[in-house]
Amino acid sequence: MKDKFIELTLGSYIISHGYNSKNKEMMEHVPSDKFSKKIVPISRIKSVSEKYILTDYVDGRWIYWEYNEDYETVKNMLV
């Protein structure tokens, strides 16, 4: 089945690299001073909040993206 995509305007993001030996989540913050358009496969979107879109990555990491659209717009793109 061919994946469907949506276009989003994304900015800074946080990468979750998993957990260390003390079960503490390892997070990498990647700031951006601007937002840019990105085509995102819908199948990679796991959750949407008012500030972040949570996506998975090919190697098992999770990425929390800040987005510029409003929550209702993104929700309507997905349902």
Image: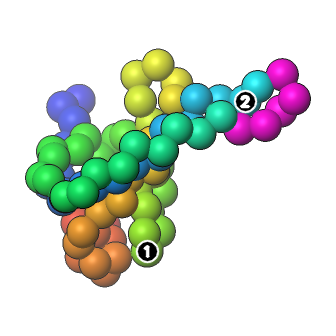
Magenta-tinted stretch = 21-25
Earlier in the chain: of badge 1 and badge 2, it is 2
Q: Is residue 33 above or below residue 77?
A: above
Is 30 in front, or is 54?
30
Residue 41 % position (x, y):
25, 41
Q: Is residue 61 above or below residue 62?
A: above
Q: Quarter holding the C terminus? A: bottom left
| Residue 19 disc label | 2
Q: Secondary structure at mark 2?
A: strand
Residue reaching furthest right? Answer: 22
Residue 62 % position (x, y):
50, 37
Q: Do labels 1 and 2 touch, CB within 8 Å?
A: no
Q: Which residue is mark 1?
A: 50
78 left or right, relative to 28: left
Q: Give the residue type that dot 1 points to.
A: Glu
Give how far apart the Cα atoms at labels 1 and 2 are: 25 Å
Q: Secondary structure at mark 1?
A: loop
Q: Is residue 50 above or below residue 47?
A: below
Q: Give the residue type that dot 2 points to.
A: Tyr
